[in-house]
Structures are given as structure tokens and as C-alpha cells.
Amino acid sequence: MRRNILVLSIALIGLVLTACAANAQFQSGIDQAGILGTIRSKGKIVVGMSTEYRPFEYKTEKGEIVGFDVDIAKELAKALGVDLVIKEYKFEDLLSNVGGDIDIVISGMTRTLDRALVKNFTDPYFETGQAIILSEKNASVNDLKELNTSKKKIIIVSGTTSADIASAKFPSANIISAASELDALKTFVSGQADALLYDKPFVDSIACNYPKMKVFPQQLSYEIYAFAIPKGDTDFLHWLNYFIADLKISGKYKEIYDKWFKDVCKI
């Protein structure tokens, strides 16, 4: 009798262990699917953008969202075999929504050590830096030290690396913060600031429309843009790095780049 009970107990233990192993294997399969599997099963990828950053992402007069990043996102969706959904946010709200309402940020975002503490960032897909454009009345400035005085107003966009560069390069200047690129532009062109400090492509686009203003030839920093995704999914991160590399190798990246940057003044 004891032996039969022992055999039965061993059998029950075996069934429990088998069930646990099966459940663990099932759970492992879910984990392995990760963000990539979820995106493909949903049939869409949700990309977060701040749509006031010409020529990376902005709205046409008809309300269509276009730009360099938009074309990159379209290629990403095509490579995944899913639909592209773009969700708009203020720039400073993008990272907090990654892993929630959006799968990924593709929005001219500089990869920094501080940002990398809270989100994962891919390999670079664009290289740029901070530049400064001078108002018409300050176009004769040949040394940026002339701006480092409380009499000079420099406008930047809050929550971006322009704020950090302004504090480091112009500690004595009157730094004005704008909530968005569009707000900064409006303030600057209305004559309320002596200079605007921001990413070079945006600064160059301003100069196209306001030729009497002067883009200072010296770039103030060198930065890289990268995609931002939630922490913890290395498979998704690796795949995105492969995607960026493949986009460049195939020549598609150059095609998109030339479309938006070969002659930025025609955009």
C-alpha cells in the first residue's frame, strides 16, 4: 500500500512539473514575441512625433504630416509589414508615452545619457548639432561672445538640448524658453529675440524664408538622432539597428535624405 501511494505521489509530482514546464514554455513564448511580435500581431506600429520640426516632421496646409522622419517611419512600417500610425505630442511628452500609447519615437530626438537612463535608443540615423541664427539687427555679429550679455535675448525650445547648450555657452545672456519650435520661431521673427538657438536643419530652414537673418557659421555642438523605445526588449532594439543599417546599405536612406535636405529651401 505504501509503495502504491509513493508511486502515485511521484506520478502526481511528475504531472505538476510537466504542467509547470508547459506553462513556463508558453510564457517564454509570449516574452520572446516581445514588442516586435505585438506590433506584427496588431498589424500596426504607432510612432510618436512632435510635428513642428521642419523638415523632419511638420503639417502641410492641408493638415498632412510630412517630412524626413515620416518617410523613415513609412519604410519602417513597410519592413515590418504593418500599417503606420502617427501620434502627435509635445516634444517633452514623447518619452513618457513610449511603451504606453506609442511603440517608438522617431522625431529628431537627440540620444543623450540622461534620456538613455529611462529609454533605450538605437544606433544613430541622423547626425546634426546645435546652431544659432541671428536676427537682422544682429547679423553683423562675428563673435558669439557678443551674445553672452544680459542685454541679448536668446530663444530656445524647452525640454531640448538647445536649453543645455544655451546655459553652457551663454551663461550671462537672457535665455527665453518657448514651448515648441513653432512658438520659438514666432517669437524670434517678431523681433522679440536677438538670436534663436536650435538644431541646425531647423535653423537653416528659417534662413531660407528670412534671408536677412544670419546663420552663424560655427556649429555649437554635434549630436546624433536615434529612435527611442521602451527598456527591456533587446530583440526589438537589435532589429531596429539592423533596419537602420539596411536602409543605408540599400540606398533608400540617401534617397530620402536628398529629398528633404539636398535643397532645404525648396521644401
Image: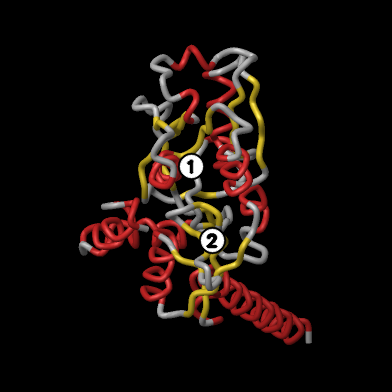
Residue 48, by quadrant, is bottom right
State yes or no: discs 1 and 2 in contact (Cβ < 8 Å): no
Other residues around mark 1 within 10 Å, as few (<14) / some (14–19) / many (≥20): many
Label 2 neighbour load within 10 Å: few <14, some 14-19, many 20+: many
21 versus 163 height, above or below: below
Image height of 206 relative to 34, above or below: above
- Image mark for residue 98: none
78 left or right of 193 in image: left
Position of residue 73 measured from the top left corner of the image (x, y, whole percent): 43, 66
Q: Residue at x 42, y 26 (%)?
A: 220
> Mark 1: which amino acid?
Arg
Q: Secondary structure at mark 1?
A: loop
Badge 2 amino acid: Ile
Q: Nearer the viewer, residue 186 or 175?
A: 186
Figure quadrant of the C terminus: bottom left
Residue receiving disc 2: 104
Q: Residue at x 47, y 30 (%)?
A: 136
Q: Which residue is mark 1?
A: 111
